Amino acid sequence: MATFAVILPAAGQSRRFHDKAYKKPFAPLGGRAVWLHAAEKFLNRADVKQTILVIAAEDRELFDMKFGANIAIMGVEVIEGGQERTDSVQRALERVKSDIPFVAVHDAARPCLADPWIDDVFTAAARDGAAILAAPIQATLKRVKEQGAGSKEQGARSGSAPRSPLPAPRLLQIAETVSREGLWEAQTPQVFRRELLIEAYAKRGRDAVTDDAQLVERLGHAVTVVPCSPLNIKITTRDDLKLAEQVLKVLPKPKLEGFQHPFAADDLFR
């Protein structure tokens, strides 16, 4: 049986989440923090031998206060990440045990995962060396351009004193309709042979990349796409929490072999 290490990046700034109390991996979802939902999908698996959660250094004190005792029970290793997501994953990759042949990288803010999807992408990665979950694009896609906008004088009526200028609303227009044929939305887990991912990160340079598969693609190595459901959503905004709560209700219940979180019903980050 192939064995896997799982890296859960949770060190981002959550700039689009717009919540003063929480970053998105730590926001309450159905009574538990988002990252707990993601982590528990792997902790119950016999083929997962190591789980590494990557958090921001600025979150360490609060994280340890809220989750320190539970982390010890769960057997999750927590490390501090870097400035970029790739820096964080690379730090975690350096901690993966040498006797584990495959590494899965899964967004800590992607809580709606089901065992059959993990089974499928793990099987494909063990066979092909690199595989990701993805969903075909169903919507009509528009490439949009922003027209130049000046400023408006507020209250510039005849005979009235001009007020301070306000920026004009953004003017967005369709530049073209993009064919969705052959387009898929990449998801996680993204799973790779450990040596392959190490090589990809060693050669990554400083160009911005948005996922790990992109680095492996640059090596010229084929990456298998495993079809998955659009329900495997990533939390980006607060509205996504409402959707995720409903998705969790309809997903298959996780396997109960192995680890079971002792405080499953608690919101540990409130």
Image (tube, rainbow, N blue to C red):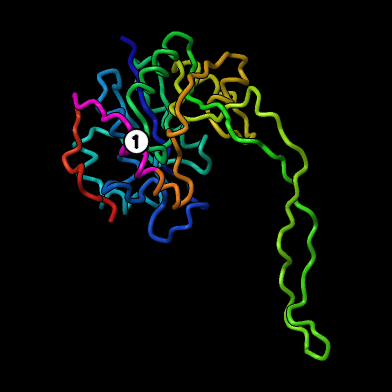
Is 111 inside the magenta-drawn segment?
no
Return the x and y of residue 173 as percentages of the image width and height.
75, 49
**Residue furthest to the right:** 158
Quarter residue 213 falls in: top right
- Residue 114 to residue 67: above or below: above
Q: Position of residue 115 (x, y in %)?
A: 32, 24
The region drawn magenta spans 244-257
Q: Is residue 222 left or right of residue 155?
A: left
Residue drawn where x is 70% and y is 29% of the image = 179
Amino acid of disc 1: Ala
Percent x, y for residue 18? Answer: 48, 57
Q: Residue at x 78, y 89 (%)?
A: 161
> Residue 36: which quarter of the image?
top left
Q: Secondary structure at mark 1?
A: helix
Determine which residue is flagged by label 1.
38
For the residue pair 221 and 238, the one nearer the viewer reads as 238
Name the one closer to the observer, 45 or 96.
Answer: 45
Q: Residue furthest bottom?
A: 159
